[in-house]
Structures are given as C-alpha cells and as structure tokens.
Amino acid sequence: MRIRLYFLFLVPLVSVLHFGLEAGSLHVRKGTQLDTIKEAIALAGKGDTIFVHEGTYLENQMEINKPMAIIGVNKPVIDSQGGDEIFIVKADQVLIQGLTLQNIGVSHLKDRAAIRVVEARNVIIDNNLLLNTFFGIYLQNASRCRVLNNTIRGEAYDEMNAGNAIHIWKGSQMEVINNHLSQHRDGIYFEFVDQSLIRGNTSQDNMRYGLHFMFSNYDTYEKNIFRRNGAGVAVMFSKQIRMIKNTFEENWGGSSYGILLKEISDGLMVQNTFIRNTIGVYAEGANRIKIEKNDFINNGKAMDIKGNCIDNEILSNNFIGNTFEVLTNSRSNLNHFEGNYWAQYKGYDLNKDGIGDFPHRPVNLFALITDKIPAANMLLHSFLVDALDMAERMFPEIIPEHLSDERPRIKPYTYD
Amino acid sequence: MFKIAKFIISDLIKNWIILLYAFFLLLATIGFFLLQGQGDKAILGVLNLTLMLVPMITVIFSTIYYYNMYEFMVLLMAQPLKRGSIIGSFYLGLLVSLGLAIVAGLGLPLWLMHPHWVSLVLSGVALLLSGIFIGLALLVAVWVRDKARGMGFALFLWVYFVLIFDGLVLLMMYNFSDYPIEKVVLYITFLNPVDLGRIMVLMQTEAAALMGYSGAIFQQFFSEWWGLIASLLIMLAWAFIPVAFSFRMFRDKDL
C-alpha cells in the first residue's frame, strides 16, 4: 500500500522532470536564466511549447523554423522599439497566442510585419494584441492558417506611411475570425487567396479600405462590421464570393463607398446592411451577382450600377431614407430589379396584395445630372429640381426607361 | 418711429392671415416630424416647405399690406414726421409680426421636436428670408404705384428666386460643364438668398457629404464656420440693400 502511494507521487514528478529535461516546454521569464525568447526558440525542439511570462521583452527578428507553440502568460509585451519584424514563421504547425507585440518602424523598402508567415501551413495566430505595428499579420504563400481573436491597432495618419492590419498574399483555406482591426491602411488585405473565410471581424477607421479583396475566388465573408473606413470595402477581380450579413456603415466622404464591386462575377450578397454611406454599393463590371434581402438605409446614393454590369439580380431589398436610390450611367438596363421596397415609391396598392400597382423607377434625374456635373449639387433639394424629377419619373426622357422594379413592395421587409 | 411701429405690430398680430400663416407652419412642422419619424428627413421636408412658403407669403402679404395702408400713410405724412421713420416703422412692424409668426410656427416646434444646431440654422434662415422678402416687397410697392402691377411684379420676384433662377443656373451648368465652374457656381449662389439659405441648412445635415462629393470647394466653404458667417453676412446684405433702396425711393417720392 505504502509503495503504491509513493508511486502515485513519483509519476508526475518524473514526468515533469522528464519534459523539463527534454525541453517539452520552456518558460521564458525575466530574472531567470532563460530570459529572451530568441534563446528559447533556439533551444526548443520540434513540437515544443514556449511559455512567455509577464514582462517586456525588447526583441525582434525571431525566426521560427520548426513546429512549436509560443504562448504568452499574462500578456507579455514584445517591443521592437521602432525596429524590424518580430516573428518570422517559416515552419508548419506553429501557434502564437496571447502576446502583445508593439512598435514596429515604418519602412518604405520592406513591408515589416509583427508576425510574418512565409510558405507555411496550419499556423494559428490567436488572441494577440498588436499595437503600432507597421503591418500587423502578414501571411505570404501560406495555406490553412487561422488568424483568430486578435486586436490590431495601428497609428497610421496617412496612406503613404501605413501598412495593412492583416495582409494575406497568395494562399488558400485561410480563416480570419473575430479580429478587431483599426487605423491601418487596409484592415484586411486579400490578394490571390482562395476558399477562405472572413467572419465576425470589425474593421474600422482605416485609411483606405476596411477590406481589400483582389484576385481571390470562392471566399466567404460574413457578419463583419466595416465602419468609417476611408473608402469602405473593395472587392475586385474575383469570382464566386459570398457576402453575408455584413454591416457597412458610416463611410462618408468623397469617393467613399460601402462596398465597391469591380470586375467581379457570380457572387452572392445576402442580408447585408448599408447605413449612412456616401454610396452604398458601387458596381463596375460586376456580373451575375445576386443582391438579395439587404438593407440600404440613409445612404447618399444607395446603389451606383454602371452600364457595364450585366445580369445582376437585385431582389427583395429595403431602400429606406436614401437621398438617391439607384444611379447608372447607361440608358439601357441589363440588370433585374424585382420585389424591393423603395421608400420613394409613390404608388398605391388597390388589390391589397402587398405589391404596388405600377412599376417604380428608382433612378433619379437629378442623380444623373450631378453625376455628370458635380457642381449641380448646389441645386440639391431645390423646388425646381424636385419638380423636374417628378415629371421625369412619369414620362422618362433622360432616365433609363427600362430600369424599373415591376413589383415594388408596399411595406419594408423585416429580416432576422 | 417706435410708436408707429408698435401700432402696426398690434394691428398685424390680430391679422387673421398672419395667425393662419403661423398656424399652418406649426401644423406642417409637427406633421413632418410625426410622419417622417427621422429627424433629418423631416428637416428636409420642413426646409422645402419653408423655402417655398416663407418668401411667397412674405412678399405677397407685405405688398398687399403696403397698398392697403397707403391712405393711412398719406395721413401720417400730414403729421410732423420724418418720411424715413414712417417707412422704417412699416418695415419694422412687418418684420416683427412675420418674424413672430415664424418663431411661433417654425422655430419653437422645430426646437422642441429636434433640438439640434440644424434647427436653429433653419429658423434663422427663415427669419432672414422674411427680412429679405419684406424688403423686396417694399421696394416693389414703393416703386410701382399701381396695385395690380405691383402685385404682379412681387409675385414675379418670388417665382424668379424660387424657380427661374435655379433653371437658369442649371442651364448654365449644362452649357459650361466642360469648364471648372465650381467656384463660379459658389459665387452664383450668392445671387439668390433662397439658394443660399437652402445650402446653409443642407450643409448642417447628412446631405453635406453628398454635396461634397467631388464638389470640394463647396464643402470647404459652407462647412467651415467662416463660410457660415460669410453666407450670413451676404444674407444680411440681401436684406439691407432693397430696404435701403426703398427708404431712399420713399423719401424722394411724390406721393
């Protein structure tokens, strides 16, 4: 009996000793022998865990070239002091968690990032705080990486001297989830990234785009919030993009959009909300996009669809309180509008089927005029312009006659 | 002067047209807020109504009032009074009573429904427009002795400022759209107090960003405080110049 009890104590003791000796986990702590992370990384073997304890570590340019986990205990701070990159991950299966990384200097020669992942797979970057890092997290030519729960806050003041919060260049099956990104050039930057998911992020107050998306196909982004970004969100040169339940708000100012769709095709936009943007959706060369059940509320121009957009379906959306509902630069219409609720619809519904008895033409004459002559904005809401607009809607002469919703809803939809 | 003004004010306040005017403004303002629900949209509705109605009622009412009081004025002339003080008290009386109608019908309900800077600007613009159009009406009435012609002329002024001017500007913009006309357009707005007032109010609302959309000069001028003060001064000039002219004309006129 006594022997057995002794044994029970012995087993954990031995195992701790065993792992301690074999470096299964390393503890970096100020005041101990192992007080730099760089040293720990050099000591660590494949698959080891490095625990970084509380304190400030003035280190940078740490290259990780074997699978390992670096976990911060009580948010240790790693400060580059305006210097170079902090972590350069060149191995698969790396976890970086719970750290505060800060102060990376602006460089015009090199895109310095707090965490750079180079040609790696299965890297997880979780729950870190990045402050004033030029580029935040930079993944190049990587796949199956996950960037989760990070807060990345920059101190960018102009576009020239700013980097992107999460920058992914070439990759596939990435996940960017629940991050808070602010004050960078772009919040999230995707270039050549396929089959990826962007979910639950908040991207606000960035100099340029909240989300910048190019040459990336088969991606989904949902439930994100893009707020007060210099130019909103841009989705360009991509196909098969699904945009679901995102919120685009308060992107005010000249050339600012809720979302800019350029040369994209076969996408899906469902249940998004556009509130108080200069232009809600700006589409140029967008084809076969299904825009359904979105809310367009209090925008300057809810939608600007250029003449080179073909076969888009705009169905069952709410257009409420927008100054102009739809704007286009073509006299013909190659898109399909149906069953939307238009707050500016002046018709009636005699047979009470919830659908207005005559079609609605959402294009406003004055919107077309100001599009051509910006100075004409001076006449906005003047009596003459309102009268002209009313007449034009009845007898279309300048506005595209065929751009109309044949089945306008009488009451707004409520989605949940 | 103030004695006569006081008499005219007490006469005008009991005038049922002024009461109706105030009541209608009150009803419309409250109605817009109740129907629209959202503050900014209701402000836009009230703005449109104000810019149409205030100049119209003011210009018509003032002209008619002058012609109706013509005999009374001739009677006053027989007294040892300066001509300047007679026409001055007329202007003052009209300004105070129409101004009171606006404060009661527009200013108060606006402030109660939407206590915001923009409400103050809108009320201020309405007051300024009243001052301006009373001045224009007096100018026309003093100048043209014939009642029918005077009325026609006053109405034409209203149509011109509310409708024709904008049409001409639009026409000009269409023809000169290839040129950098933004700055010119800014100066052109100074030529019409109604447009100026509209832009002053719009700049305080959401529409400001829309106006700024590639018309940066506009945005710059009207959203800065000195732009607001400059436009205020221009409005005051618009009120002052016709009044000064009508005073002068009245003084030298063979009644």
Image: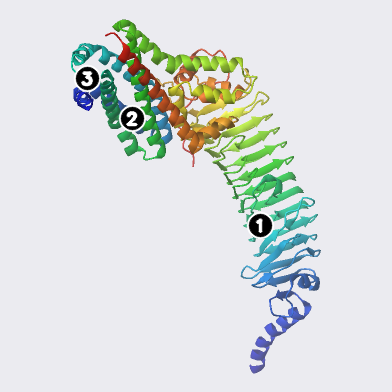
Q: Amino acid at mark 2?
A: Thr
Dividing the picture into quadrants, the one containing residue A18 is bottom right
Mark 1 element type: loop
- Does A274 sit above or below residue A223? above
Q: Is residue A337 toward the left or the right of residue B1 in the image?
A: right
Q: Residues within 10 Å of mark 1 (few under 14, many from 20)?
A: many
Chain letter of disc 1 in the image: A
Instruction: Give the image location of residue A215, x and y in percent.
Output: 74, 39
Mark 3 element type: loop
Instruction: Give the image location of residue A10, x and y in percent.
Output: 69, 87
Q: Are marks 1 and 3 in contact (CB under 8 Å)?
A: no
Q: What is the number of the mark on residue B29?
A: 2
Q: What is the number of the mark on residue B81?
A: 3
- Does B213 sit above or below residue B15? below
Chain letter of disc 3 in the image: B
Instruction: Give the image location of residue B217, x and y in percent.
Output: 58, 31
Quadrant of the snapshot with the N terminus of chain A: bottom right
Query: Dot 1 corresponds to which residue?
Result: A132
**Which circle's residue, 2 or 3, is located before the other in the chain?**
2
Q: Is residue A367 visible?
A: no
Identity of the residue drawn at 54% across and 14% down? A396
Q: Residues within 10 Å of mark 2 (few under 14, many from 20)?
A: many
